[in-house]
Image (cartoon, helix red, strand yellow):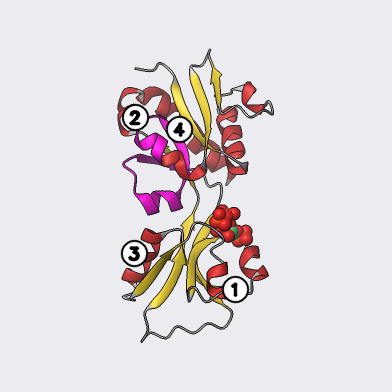
Amino acid sequence: MDKYLNIALPKGRLGEKVYDMFEKIGYPCPSIKENNRKLIFENEELKIRYFWVKPSDVAIYVERGAADVGVAGKDILMEYKPEIYELCDLKLGKCSMAVAAKKGFIDDRNKTLRVATKFVNIAKEYYQSQGRDIDVIKLNGSIELAPILNLSDVIVDIVETGTTLKENNLEVVEKFLPISARLIANKSSFKFKTEIIEDIVNKISTAVDNND
Ligand code: PRP
């Protein structure tokens, strides 16, 4: 078995904050701060290896054991339900999953609601819980365009500051799921690398509590 602990970080601003947290709790890897396009960084002494992964792919790396631990958004965990352990809430990258529509939109419950989203499963579950029939339209980005061009009636998407909705004359109908970044672990890694993973969880949980 790999002696290293492999850590998948979500590439981007959130990932940088997550790395700072790992550094603060005693798992530094200074070379990661050097500004280059490398994706893998090792601390030989601590036997840890970080790599930058597209945020929506972190759970796949962890589920399949290419990474022992990683940080993924609750949105991705809810949408794909990967077979992983969710260890703790980092309370970073906070946003909401929301239904949004054109300003003044009124839902005609006699009609099937057309819902555009990247999060097909989350949207289906939400509307099932509401007893509402929907026609899901899967998009890959710029979801806000759909109601404007009458491709859909509403969207189910992530809202952080609300700026994207506002600048496109849309408004939140309902925020129904709070999202934040979660520390996750591969199930068998957790069994075989328990000590180091538990050390990380304990120290990160304390750091998160102190940030509150
Ligand atoms: C997300 C989301 C919204 C936007 C919300 O998009 O899909 O478009 O952020 O942020 P705001 O409330 O602060 O404006 P992302 O940047 O992930 O790009 P996407 O178009 O690929 O979904």
Of the two numbered discs 1 and 4 on the same chain, state the one appearing first in sequence: 1
Q: Secondary structure at mark 1?
A: strand
Q: Nearer the viewer, mark 4 or mark 2?
A: 2
Residue 199 on the magenta span: no
Q: Residue at x 56, y 46 (%)?
A: 92
- Disc 1 crowd rating (10 Å Cα; few below 14, some 14-19, many 20+) is many
Of the two numbered discs 3 and 4 on the same chain, state the one appearing first in sequence: 3
Q: Residue at x 56, y 49 (%)?
A: 93
Q: Secondary structure at mark 4?
A: helix
Q: Secondary structure at mark 3?
A: helix
**Is 185 above or below relative to 193?**
below
**Residue that label 4 marks:** 202
Marks 4 and 3: in contact by CB < 8 Å? no
CA distance for labels 4 and 2? 14 Å
What kind of residue is marked 2?
Phe
Work out whether residue 160 can be spotted.
no
**Is 73 above or below relative to 24?**
below
Asked whether, in this view, residue 129 is left or right of residue 69, the answer is left
Q: Which mark is residue 170?
A: 1
What kind of residue is marked 4?
Asn
CA distance for labels 3 and 4? 33 Å
Please state the extent of the stretch shown in magenta in the rendering: 60-89
Of the two numbered discs 3 and 2 on the same chain, state the one appearing first in sequence: 3
Of the two numbered discs 3 and 1 on the same chain, state the one appearing first in sequence: 3
CA distance for labels 3 and 2? 30 Å
Marks 2 and 1: in contact by CB < 8 Å? no
**Residue that label 3 marks:** 125
Marks 4 and 1: in contact by CB < 8 Å? no
Q: Which mark is residue 93?
A: none
Residue 57 percent across, percent down from the top left: 45, 41
Of the two numbered discs 4 and 2 on the same chain, state the one appearing first in sequence: 2
**Residue that label 2 marks:** 190
